[in-house]
Amino acid sequence: MSAAPDGDLAVDVVRLTSVLCALFGAAGVSTNDARITVDSLVAAEVDGVSSHGIALVPLYLERLQAGGVVANAVPSIVEDLGGLLVIDAAHALGQVSSQIAVELAVARARVHGLAFVTVRHAFHFGTAAFWTRQVASLGMVGFAFSNTRPLMPAPGGAQRVVGNNPLSIAFPSAEGLPLVVDMAMSATAMGRIRIAEAKGLPIPEGWATDDAGVPTTSAAAAIKGLLLPAAGPKGFGLAVAIELLCGAISGGAIGASVKPLYGNPSQHYDCSHAFIAIDASRANGGQGIAGLVTSFANEIRTSTPSSGTTQIYAPGDLERARSSQRSESLPLSTALVAHIDALAEKAGLTGRLG
């Protein structure tokens, strides 16, 4: 391990994965379930999405130990209509139930051309893009959605009524790497605000308000306050639609029935997810869409830049560029490394990051 340019510590990805898998194993998670969970969190960190990466490990472990997440839960299909299915996650780790849902969506899409799989009684699943990339790598178009506890007000409101509900859509491309859209419906993710608070940094204007609905640049005030929707009413409207796609169709929790992620660790989070797979190999007269996706992505990249802009990116390009720089080691804060090593020591493990 060495120092990263910004003062963080550069942690080897292989060692990181090994230590984290051992930590989840010590918490009662099976080897396979631990690996898919850790792979998801490491992938987020590699993409530069630290709000959904290694910083979540202490939270996940605390919930496993307190019972809010059930280590040995076995998700099951509770409704099967062919191309529309509902899975009860039984409060398993979100990555565990999501892997089952994605594989099921792909298998049914091969039969029906399209499949929609929803998951109720679920937990945080990392980044939505982790799941849609899997679908796109198989030549299909993948969609992933999740609802969260209420974080955003209605336009003009000062009360949380809907989550910032992320969505991701990934398209297969002839380049081999998919074109990926991944975003929450708020101006930023709550995880990024928590990271800013931990570092003692302010947040940009337009991200959040305090608990009275007054715009703020204080991370601490924002955590107690409200996230603002991306693009105002448009982001709010999409968040409502995702809330219903996930919670209503699955028969799961909606709105305030979803509990705080950073709340009582013994209480089930109880969010809902939804996944769609479209067998795009059957589209475009049987030729598929990969060539069209690549052509359009290149059209975006070669479009005329505005004054002062040196490069135009297609969706997913920035994350791809970051991941190419972080394939072997990741910059993690000294505090986070120390926290994980303390958890490993407490669990009686020999592996350490530091």
Image (tube, rainbow, N blue to C red):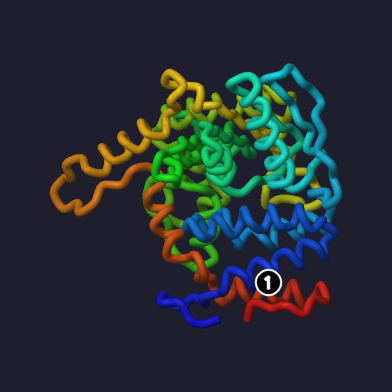
Query: Residue at horizontal 57%, vertical 46%?
Result: 130
User: Which percent across, then down, holds residue 186?
Assistant: 47, 40
> What's the residue type where badge 1 is placed?
Ile
Query: Residue at horizontal 58%, vertical 32%?
Result: 162
**Quadrant of the drawing holding the N terminus:** bottom right
Q: Secondary structure at mark 1?
A: helix
**Among the 4 quarters of the image, the one containing residue 258:** top right
User: Which percent across, then down, holds residue 107?
Assistant: 67, 30
**Quadrant of the drawing holding the C terminus:** bottom right
User: Which percent across, then down, holds residue 213?
Assistant: 48, 41
User: Which percent across, then down, holds residue 87?
Assistant: 76, 31
- Please tell me how crowded label 1 is: few (under 14), some (14-19), or many (20+) other residues with Cα within 10 Å: many
Q: Is residue 24 left or right of residue 130?
A: right
Residue with the mark numbered 1 = 340
Residue 254 appears in the rendering: no
Depth check: give the residue in front, 82 or 291. Answer: 291
Relative to 348, say whether 34 is above or below.
Answer: above
- Which residue is the extreme one toward the left? 307
Depth check: give the residue in front, 279 or 144. Answer: 279
**Among the 4 quarters of the image, the one containing residue 333:** bottom right
Q: How many marks?
A: 1
Residue 291 appears in the rendering: yes
Query: Residue at horizontal 76%, vertical 59%?
Result: 62
Relative to 213, say whether 112 is above or below.
Answer: above
Query: Residue at horizontal 57%, vertical 73%?
Result: 12
